Image: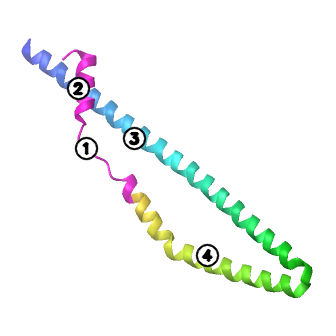
Amino acid sequence: MNSGTGIQELMAAETRASQIVAEARIARGDRMKQARVDAEELIAAYRLEQQDAFDKKANADGGSGNNASAKLQAETNAEIQDMQGQFHQNAQKAVDVLLSKCCEVSLEVPSARIRSTQKIYGK
C-alpha cells in the first residue's frame, strides 16, 4: 500500500509541476504580447509627436518659398538616414537583449506557490 500511495503522490507532483511549467509558458507569452502592444503604442505616440513637429516646422518655413521646403526636405531625409543607420546598428543588440530576457526561466518553485499548492491539496 505504501508504494502505491508513493507512486500516486509522485504522479500528482509531476502533474502539478507540468501545470506550473505550462502556466509559466503562458504567462511569458502574455508578457511578450503585452510588451509588443506597449512598444507599438510608444512608437505610435513618438511618430505622431515627430510628425507634429515636422508639420509645424514645415508650416513655419512654408511661406518663404520652395527653397525652404527643399532645405527642410533635405534635413528630414538626412535625419531619416541617420535614424535608419542607428536602427541597423542597434537592431541585433535589441534582439539579443529581448531573447536573453525571454529565455531566462527560473526552475525554482517559489515558496509561496508551494504553500498555496499544499493548502489546495491539503498536504
- The residues colored magenta run 100-123
- Answer left or right for 30 relative to 7: right
Nearer-N-terminus badge (2/4): 4
Asked which colour scheme the image uses, the reply is: rainbow
Which of discs 1 and 4 lies nearer the camera? The answer is 4
Kind of residue sitting beneath label 1: Leu
What residue is shown with label 3?
25
Q: How far apart are marks 4 and 3 (CA)?
A: 34 Å
Q: Which residue, as the protein is rendered here, is positioned at the far bottom?
A: 67
Q: Which of 59 and 34 is in front in this view?
A: 59
Kind of residue sitting beneath label 3: Arg
User: Could you say whether the residue bearing mark 1 is in a helix, strand or loop?
Assistant: loop
Instruction: State the residue at coordinates (32%, 33%).
Output: 20
Which of discs 3 and 2 lies nearer the camera? The answer is 2
Q: Distance between the residues labelled 2 and 4?
A: 51 Å
Kind of residue sitting beneath label 4: Gln
Which of discs 4 and 3 lies nearer the camera? The answer is 4
Tell me if label 4 and label 3 are in contact, CB under 8 Å: no
Q: In which quarter of the image is residue 69?
A: bottom right
User: Could you say whether the residue bearing mark 3 is in a helix, strand or loop?
Assistant: helix
Q: Which of 60 and 85 is in front in this view?
A: 60
Mark 1 nearby-residue class (10 Å; few <14, some 14–19, many ≥20):
few
What residue is shown with label 2?
115
For the C terminus, the image quarter is top left
What residue is shown with label 4?
84
Position of residue 58 measured from the top left corner of the image (x, y, whole percent): 82, 74
- Whether residue 115 appears in magenta in the rendering, the answer is yes
Q: Distance between the residues labelled 2 and 1?
A: 17 Å
